[in-house]
Image (cartoon, rainbow, N blue to C red):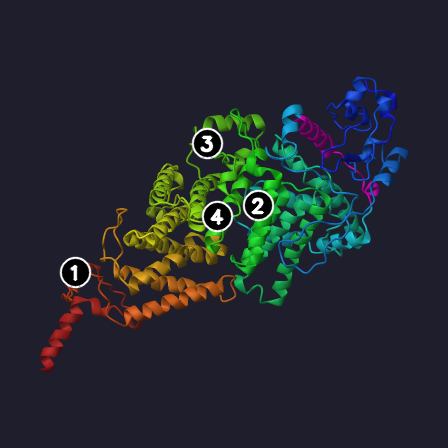
Amino acid sequence: MPSNEGTERPSRASLRRPNGRPQACEPCRKRKVACDNRQPVCRRCEKTSRGPDCQYIVDPRMSIVAPVTSAVVGGPPGSPTSSHASSRVHQPTAAVRGTSVSSSSFSPVTDTPLSNPVTGPGYLGPTSFCGIYEEAEERLSLFREIACENARSHADAHVPTSSLPDLSPRTLETCLVVLRQIPLRKEAERLCGVYTNPNEMWYWLFGPRALASLYDTFEECLGDGKRSDAALADMAKRLCYNTSRPFPENADEPKTWERQFSGDNFRWETLAILFTYWAFGTNVSTPVRCEIMQVPKLRHKMNDYLEGIDICIQLCRSLNNGNTFLLFVLFRRTILESMKSGDASPLVWRGQGDVVSHLTFLGLHAEPNPPTYVPTICSEWRRRLCYYVFNIDKVIAAFTGRPPAFSRRYLLTPWPLDLPDSDLMSDKATLAKVAATQLDANGWNKSGIVGPSTICRARAVISTFRDEIFELAMGNGVGTTDELLWDIFNREKAAVAALPSKVLYKHEDLINPLVDHNMYAYKLLVRLEHLQNGFFIYRMLKQRGHDIQADLVAVSFELVSLTLLYWTHLDRVPRIVTDLEWIVMAYAAPSGGILSQELLCPSTTPGRTANSGKNGPSRFAIIEKLFLLVGFLDWVSPNAPNSDLCRSCKRVIRHVLEKVTAQEPAPAPGVEQAAPVFEPWNWDIGGTSLDFDFELLDTFDWLRPDVHASQGHLGNGLQ
């Protein structure tokens, strides 16, 4: 039983040493034993009847963290205990840390809403300063267990608005800037309805309910009528308080996890995620999407949402040490910036670096992989989020030619299991049963369903090999050999061939009604990324003097041909239309450059079989695809973020086509120029002749045999 003397003490703010670790009480510190840091009396002192001696000495260098439930632990709201604790702890002082990933012009927050953010050292790896002590005392694991227990016990504790700490005037005004930009409920639902990315795990699981929770919980603040600043101020206090509390990342049940960021526990991170959906919806719901930044009425709305995201990021950083939701916001903010500024923009590069830094701080790159792993929604969310970042990091590196920020050599997290999102919403026991019965030994789903996790896993396989390629292509060249390049090529080819057939692209998928739009688009993307790996390796081998031109031309032709399907069959992939600018520049433009060089200086015999066994494209086929590519590049709006790059590529390809179509093609070295052979038309059109009989619309009469015969009789009569 706890001693009466210990329980009568008022709740205190938790203390941390300068290195970020929790401060031990004096009896435990002097005896050099582990302290669970519980206040007002730790468990060890309770068991040993040292309650009166259990004291925490305050050092000026220490960080003081406000207790998350001081208003409800010491007594009911309004009681002397709760008011005393609240008045002693909550005083707005410290400064906001961090910088935004965008170039928005809002004023940074200079004081935090609460006394101090919930701080901590984050992920500490095996070489960190506390690694040896963790092995000796296993103290960190004890602390994490206690922290998780406290977080779970405090998650559902509701504090009345009247008992929440006040915000400083500057912080309050910053919060109001964000809250005033929240759209009306109907508009918010419409914008979220526009967002149709099938690979978005968070939205399809929680998005609609989180949106409804926002407007239901804060109905008085966000009504359709005029919104008062007083009501929004109460909402800001609630969001700041919730965000300052610990955010548990290891819930076993989906409903338990959802309660941590919705309803009365709604956080700034949740609002920031909704802002990203509103920004995406605004960006794709206009008739001419790329002109949105040119129309003042639409431009200011888009900028308002982006500014709302940036301020939410600043508030989250000032209130806590970060979590996976903040990482998700940073990730999506970087994608939004690429759609605004272009994929080669320094803002995108800076944002991706921020994402990777936050990911490694949280330790998502080193998630444990126990032999008896039982999946939960939180563990699968962390794994999938890690590989979202890893995959997009390789895409950005390939697009810009800059070294990737996230190396596979430090990636210890296993792939997410190939589980449908609907199964992740099951309870822990049901999810474990599904994983045991529906997954094979490698974690792939045996049902043949292609879900978001399926695509994420397949792209992770290809991205891992791409990281190897980039080490050789962008490194100092030490250790790069032909054998090593061919080894990567063969291993990557074998790994892709070993993928489940459900993620492998087939040409008949284009007309297969059983393959829906989303599945087709992402199977095509997986194929393009695989081909691009081969493209990079062939380029490196050619630079090293290998006669590999036939293979390079063959893979370039296939890259251009498949990329053109996104444009020529736009009705087949309607939900990916917002990504066409980067797709054409990432996959078709480099390959188009190789085909243009082949037209100018033919180095292979037309139709020659490449070393890979693929027949090389004919000269006519290359010209045909390049003309289509010019049309694709011309289709990109001049106001699109990558329009300048598209115009440059289009101009070069047009000049090449003008040159090669205005003169006889030059023969390849060592190949004799064959004399042109003209054969008479012998079209057996018979019963398949076009018989439109639409008078002026009928421009196919020259195809009919009877027309040629009548023209012959007429000619004889005139003679």
Q: CA distance from mark 4 to mark 3?
A: 23 Å
Q: Which mark is residue 684?
A: 1
Residue 37 can be seen, yes or no: yes
Which of disc 3 and disc 4 is earlier in sequence?
A: 4
Could you tell me how far apart the alpha carbons at marks 1 and 2 are, in whole angstroms? 63 Å
The three-letter code of the residue at mark 4 reads: Lys
Q: Nearer the viewer, mark 4 or mark 1?
A: 4
Q: Is residue 16 above or below residue 136?
A: below
Check disc 4 and report the residue beneath it. Answer: 394
Is label 2 in a helix, a strand or a loop? helix
Residue 541 sits inside the magenta stretch: no
- Residue annotated with mark 3: 443
Q: Earlier in the sequence, mark 3 or mark 2?
A: 2
Q: CA distance from mark 4 to mark 1?
A: 52 Å
Helix, strand or loop at label 1? It is loop
Single out the mark in the foreground, 3 or 2: 2
Discs 1/2, front = 2
Q: Is residue 578 left or right of residue 611?
A: right
Q: CA distance from mark 3 to mark 2?
A: 26 Å
Q: Mark 4 falls on what kind of element?
A: helix
First of labels 4, 2 by sequence position: 2
User: Which residue is identified by label 2?
Assistant: 356
Label whose residue precedes the other's in the sequence (3 or 1): 3
Disc 4, disc 1: CB below 8 Å? no
